Amino acid sequence: MTDTTQNLLDTIGDLVELESPTGDLAALERTAAAIAALWEPLGATVTRHESEMGPHLVFEVSGRDSDARPVLLVGHHDTVHPVGSLAEMPWRIEGGTAYGPGCYDMKSGLVIAAEAVRRLQESGVAHPPVIMVVVADEEVGSPTSKELINQLAGTVQAALGFESPHPGGPLKRGRHGSTRLRITVTGKASHAALDPEAGVSATNEIVDQLTRLRPVVDRDGVLCNVGSITAPGKTNVVNDHAEAELGLRFADAATETEVLDQLTSLAPIHPRAEVRVDILSRRPAWTPASEDALLTAARAVAADLGQEFDAFPAAGAADTNAVGGLGVPTLDGLGPWGAGAHATHEQFETAALEPRIALVKGILAALA
């Protein structure tokens, strides 16, 4: 292992050991400071966007010898792993594989992005301005950062995402839409034996609603997971409140619109029940054009570097849904290849760092 690679791994390790679960404001402040320290030496203008979920960061680096519009780099510094996960899954490197909470999704990708820009600057070649956005709430659907991402997307010629790639390294070009919604039922409490007819069972209503929506979501291009059903109560009381949270994935925008229109207009089955549907987060389906300037440039750069290149859609959603869904040429999956995102065996291959940095650097130069 070269000294350069070891330095990169040390930097990633420092980030991983700053555990930063979504919603932990103190932890996210620490990672925000560490990420800013990567970009400030590059002459980046740093802007913090405060939110109830933690700080979202925007780094802007001037272009060199180029009148091209900026390129947006997209990442996040929150993880799914709670503080204390290092006890079970410590940061370590074994046989060319690095392990640790958030190392694959996506702290290694954040270091790749900053290092590619640093090397681009040192090379002296022409390059467009670069804008890097690092949000604090991606793992829960980016409810407080989506507007910021949309605003930035409107100013750029292309976007690169630093999430993990497909297994083995192919990039992600296109993503399924992802929506989380909550169905809330309000009924009327009563004694389950002495006066059952006076009550309206919210538990029965939520079950009936979930049964009714099954044929709506049981179709090609839709995945639906009922993540939770909550109906606290007692067996001798007709329950008056119930909720269900659903996660949905959509292969295309037309199916997404059709299904969500039906789900958000659910009517009560029991005439005295009340049903409300709230969309908790939504990432639109990203269906790219068959070819664009970014894809052409990336393919050519990879060929010049002697790297294999492939890019195809992913079932998982990310912040690049928003950017690609707006029609901005976008490639995601520029983090290192590995395995175990969100799992206790989360890992990436250390040999992937240098090829990824070289590819990102080359793509940025090609877009000058």
Image (cartoon, helix red, strand yellow):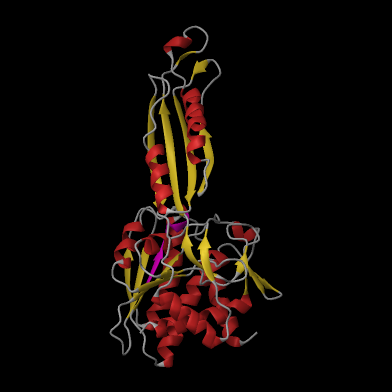
- What residue is at 28 percent from the left and 84 percent from the top? 67
Extreme residue in the bottom direction: 124
Q: Is residue 239 above or below residue 177?
A: above
Residue at left offset 42%, top offset 63%: 320
The image position of residue 128, as x and y in percent, is: 34, 82
Front-most of 304 and 198? 304
**Left or right placement of residue 240 versus residue 151 in this view:** right
Residue 3's place in the image compared with 102, above or below, is: below
Res 139 visible? yes
Question: In the figure, 155 relative to 125: above or below?
Answer: above
Residue 297 point in image, percent of width and height: 44, 80
Magenta highlight range: 132-139
- Quarter of the figure that contains the N terminus: bottom right
Quarter in which the C terminus is drawn: bottom left
Q: Residue at x 41, y 19 (%)?
A: 188
Q: Name which quarter of the figure residue 98 lies in.
A: bottom right
Hey, which residue is sitting farthest right in the picture?
Answer: 95
Give residue 322's position: percent from left, percent from top. 38, 60
Count of marks overlaid on the render: 0
Asked if 182 appears above or below 152 in the picture, the reply is: above
Nearest the eye: 49 or 183? 183
Q: Is residue 115 visible?
A: no
183 inside magenta stretch: no
The residue furthest front is 290
Quarter-wise, where is residue 308 in the image?
Answer: bottom right
Q: Report x, y in % for residue 141.
A: 43, 53
